[in-house]
Amino acid sequence: MVVTGLSGSGKSVALKTLEDLDVYCTDNLPVELLPEFVKSVAGDGRNMARMAVGIDVRNASDLARIPEWLSAVGSLGFDYKLVFFDTRDEVLLKRYSDTRRKHPLSHGGLALADAIELERLRLRPLQAIADLVMDTSEMNVHQMRRQVTTAVGAGTTRGMSLLFESFAYKRGLPADADFVFDARALPNPHWDARLRPLSGRDAAVREHLDQDPVVQDFVAQVQTFLDAWVPRFEAETRSYLTIAFGCTGGRHRSVYLAERLAAHCRGLGREGVLTFHRELE
C-alpha cells in the first residue's frame, strides 16, 4: 500500500494506525526504490506480506513516474493500492496555524498558501491514479484512525478491529465510543508525587496499579464482560468496536486500563487491536 497526499492531511496518522494493525510501514522512501524495497522486505525471511510505504512531496524523484514503479511491484507478484489523503486548503491552513509546524515546501520565503498550492500541483499525478481518495477535512484524529482502520485497513486483519481509548472526563466523552468504562472510583496515582509526572504507559504506574486489588477486580470484571460480548458484536458482522476508559485527568488509570485490556485481547490471538490515548497525543 502506498500512502500519499497533502502534508497535514493525515498520512502520518494513517501509517501509525496501519503499524498498529501489524502492517510493516516505512515513510518517505525514495519512490524509485519501491520495487527493490518490496522485494527486499518480502524476501528477508520475516514473512512481511503486508507493507505500507509513505511517499509525498518531500520525495526528490519524479512522482509522475510512480505508475512505472507500481507496475514493477505488480510484476513481482504483489497486489498494490495507492491511497491519497486530501484536505481542503482552509483546513490545512488552520492545522498548520494550530500546530505551528513548517510546511515542507515553505522554503525560500514561500508563503504557506503558495506552498500548499505548489504541493497540490506536484501531487496531481498521484491523485489522478489513486485507488482511494480520503478527504479528512471534517475529521479529527480519532475519526481518521477509525476511517483508516475500516477503509484503508480493510483486509489487513481477520475479524473485528478493536480500539481501546483513554480519555479525561473533564474534556468530555469520546463521541465514537461504543462502550465507556468509568475508572474514577479507582485509586488515583496522581496523588503519589513520584507517579504524578508519569502516565499509565510507564512501568512504575503499571506496577503500582498491578498491586492494587481493587484495580485488579475492575480489570477482571471488564475482561469477563468483553470476553462475553465482543464475540457477539463480531457475529453481527461489526467491523470495528471502540472501548473507552475514562478517569479524571486521562493520564494514569484510563491509560493503564486501555493498555491492559488491549494486551488481554491480543493475548487471545486477536488481530487489529489498537490503542489511542486522547490526552497523551
Image (tube, rainbow, N blue to C red):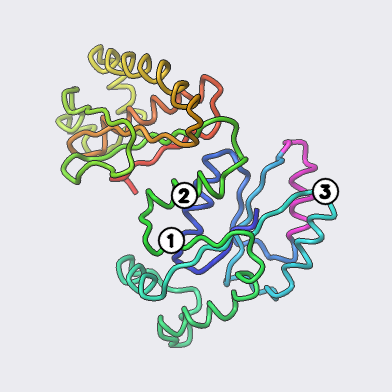
* Crowd rating for badge 1 (residues with CA inside 10 Å; few <14, some 14–19, many 20+): some
Estimate the spatial distance between the alpha carbons at disc 2 and disc 1, rounded to whole Å.
9 Å
Q: Is residue 264 visible?
A: no
| Relative depth, front residue between 240 and 26 | 240
Q: The magenta stretch spans which residues? A: 34-47
x, y percent for residue 190: 18, 33
Horizontal arrangement in the rendering, residue 237 relative to residue 2 (left or right) = left
Q: Residue at x 41, y 75 (%)?
A: 89
Q: Which residue is mark 3?
A: 77
Q: Which mark is residue 136?
A: 1
Q: Which mark is residue 147?
A: 2
What residue sits 73% from the left and 59% below the top? 34
Question: x%, y% of residue 206?
Answer: 33, 25
Residue at the extreme bottom of the image, as rendered: 109
What is the three-letter code of the residue carrying label 1?
Thr
Q: What secondary structure is the stretch in magenta mostly built from?
A: helix
Q: Is residue 16 above or below residue 33?
A: above
Report the amino acid beneath label 2. Answer: Gln
Q: Residue at (37%, 14%) from the top-left corner?
A: 224
Determine whether the residue tagged by mark 1 lies in a helix, strand or loop.
Answer: loop
